[in-house]
Amino acid sequence: MPNINNTQLKDKVVIITGASRGIGREIALTCAKAGAIVIIAAKSAEPHPKLPGTIHSVAKEIEDLGGRAVPVQIDVRDEKAIKKLCNTIAEEFGGIDIVVNNAGAISLTKVEDTSPVRYDLMQQINSRAVYVFAHYALPYLKRSDNPHILSLSPPINMNIQWLKDYSPYTLSKYGMSLLSKGMAEEFKEYGIAVNTLWPQTYIATAAIEFAVGNKEMLNYARTPAIMADAAKVILTHPSQNYTGLWLIDEEVLKAAGETDFSKYAYNPEFEAHIKKDLFLD
């Protein structure tokens, strides 16, 4: 990991959606180790038979590390719940410094095979939630000395292959990226950085195992740690001059001085065969 001052997130109030497992959990742990107050905002309050991790288990992991965490059960489709969360957290801790939009819904299905219910779910959890969190966190982010909004979405790639087979999902993710680009310019006067982050490769998460492929696909992936390390580089960067970017984890870490990516392989035996993620040619 690049040499990054571990105190740069000390006492920062960080809201991370979908933080009960996968990439969200890893970002939560990384921020907590750096001294942040981490708000674990996710739906999973009870154990799932196939998916390990809840808001409470992640909070305990953080507390066992000596960090501070607040588990909050929330559905990011619920505008009133998001408003209440932002107001409550800001009142309790004196503000909000960072919002990480990690919660996501995925269905790699064509228009013909995507029900309206599933379509709405993806638009609401992916692109709409980015807007709602920004809208209600904005008054508090304005007061922060290094405010960031970071959303996990890809660079917009108009290669038709990313539209032909699952345009409903693609639209929801590109919506996050387009909105982030616009908000970066809108919020520039407030010194709020708005960026997106996407993995160069598959990341070993439930999405890869259940939505993209199967358990064997994890062998061709990297661990969530690479996304968490990249997120930390972004979130500790001065917000005034690091905004409006569609960022890739590997490129972020290379710029920060990282040269060894082998440590991120989920299965070291398959390191040479790790696959590129969606939306990257």
Image: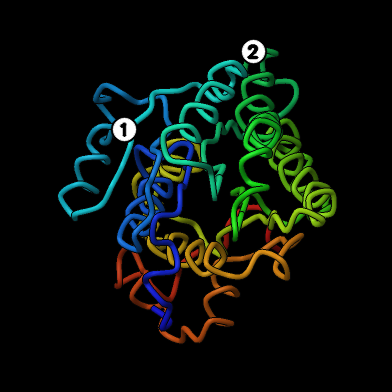
- Residue 13 in the image: x percent, y percent? 45, 47
Task: Name the amino acid, label 1.
Answer: Ile
- Residue 72 x, y percent position in the rendering: 38, 28
User: Label 2 is placed on what type of residue?
Assistant: Val
Residue in the image at 42% along x and 46% along y: 24
Horizontal side, residue 50 vs residue 274: left or right: left
**Residue at 57% from the left image edge and 42% from the top image edge:** 101
Q: Residues within 10 Å of mark 2 (few under 14, many from 20)?
A: few
Q: Is residue 240 left or right of residue 56?
A: right
Q: Secondary structure at mark 1?
A: helix
The residue depicted at 43 percent of the width and 62 percent of the height is 9
Which image quarter: residue 224? bottom left
Q: Residue furthest left?
A: 64
In front of the other: 265 or 25: 25
| Side (left or right) of 258 relative to 79 | left
> Where, quadrant-wise, is the C terminus in this rendering?
bottom right
Residue 82 in the image: above or below residue 200: above
Callout 2: helix, strand or loop?
helix
Verify CB contact (< 8 Å) between mark 2 and mark 1: no
Task: Report how far apart the C-alphas of labels 2 and 1 lie in the structure.
Answer: 26 Å
In the rendered structure, which disc, 2 or 1, sits on the residue that comes first in sequence? 1
Kindly identify which residue carries mark 1: 55
Q: Position of residue 165 (x, y in %)?
A: 72, 38
Label 2 sits on residue? 117
